[in-house]
Amino acid sequence: MIEIHDFPKFTVLTGNYGSGKTELALNLALQSASKGFRTTLVDLDIVNPYFRSAEKSAELEEKGIRVLMPTFALTTVDIPALPAEIQSVFETPWDKIIFDVGGDDTGAAALGRYAPQFRRYRQQTVSVMVINCMRPLTGTLEDILDLNGRIAARGRLQTDWFINNTNLADQTEPDMVQYGESIVLECADKAGVSRTITAGTRSVLQRCNLRTEEIVIERRMVPEWMRE
């Protein structure tokens, strides 16, 4: 079972809209803080105003997690800007820094701004693409490889790991997760990605027969209309 101590100092999470990368970012940040690590969560999403980690900033800060986000995030002002404060994460002695990058290659443009810093700290960085094979544009091998190539090129950072996060929220069944795993493993082989992990809730993972390492997550970004 994979936990936060298996991740290096800098974790960069990319993926298409609906992949669950923000869910994973929140889980990693909260687990990191619970283990006593000094933790920063950087919301680099300059594209999508919905389902972003900044929405949980108050909850995260209560747990001692520093949250950095684009200027005007969570407002009606459509002028995305990355504050200079984000640059500071490369120079401060925090233990774990998690970057939640905006979906697709357009969102990855914000990541590319920090390419010199990531090159400098490459040995302390892992770039992770989160994949949900139940979502449009990441349902096939060809689509995933195409998206991964575009994100890596625009973000100027090659992907190190894939995380299979195939799910349909509360309707997720083990066969869906296993189907996603088979596609993501094939993608990893073709893309030269060194590590593949499957994410899911504990109740679902316990019913799966998987070949990959596993990471347990809790669903924290539940839409208002799905809440009881």
Image (spheres, grey):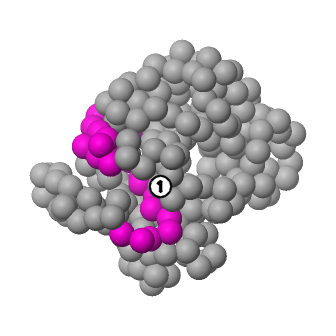
The answer to whether residue 64 is left or right of residue 155 is right
The magenta stretch is 92-117
The answer to whether residue 136 is left or right of residue 80 is right
Quadrant in which the C terminus appears: bottom right
Given the image, on which type of amino acid does mark 1 rest?
Phe
The answer to whether residue 13 is left or right of residue 78 is right
Nearest to the observer: residue 127 or residue 54: 127
| Residue 138 to residue 129: above or below | above
Nearest to the observer: residue 172 or residue 63: 63
Q: Residue at x 47, y 55 (%)?
A: 10
Q: Is 114 within the magenta?
A: yes
Q: Is 32 within the magenta?
A: no
> What element does badge 1 sit on?
strand
| Residue 26 to residue 156: above or below | below
Q: Mark 1 points at which residue?
A: 10
How many neighbours does mark 1 have within 10 angstroms: few (below 14), some (14-19), or many (20 or more)? many
Q: Residue at x 35, y 60 (%)?
A: 90
The answer to whether residue 168 is left or right of residue 13 is right
Q: Position of residue 28 (x, y in %)?
A: 57, 62
Q: Examine the rendering and report whether any part of residue 135 can be seen.
A: yes
Q: Which residue is drawn at 50% across and 69% down?
A: 95
Q: Which residue is drawn at 84% across and 43% down?
A: 208
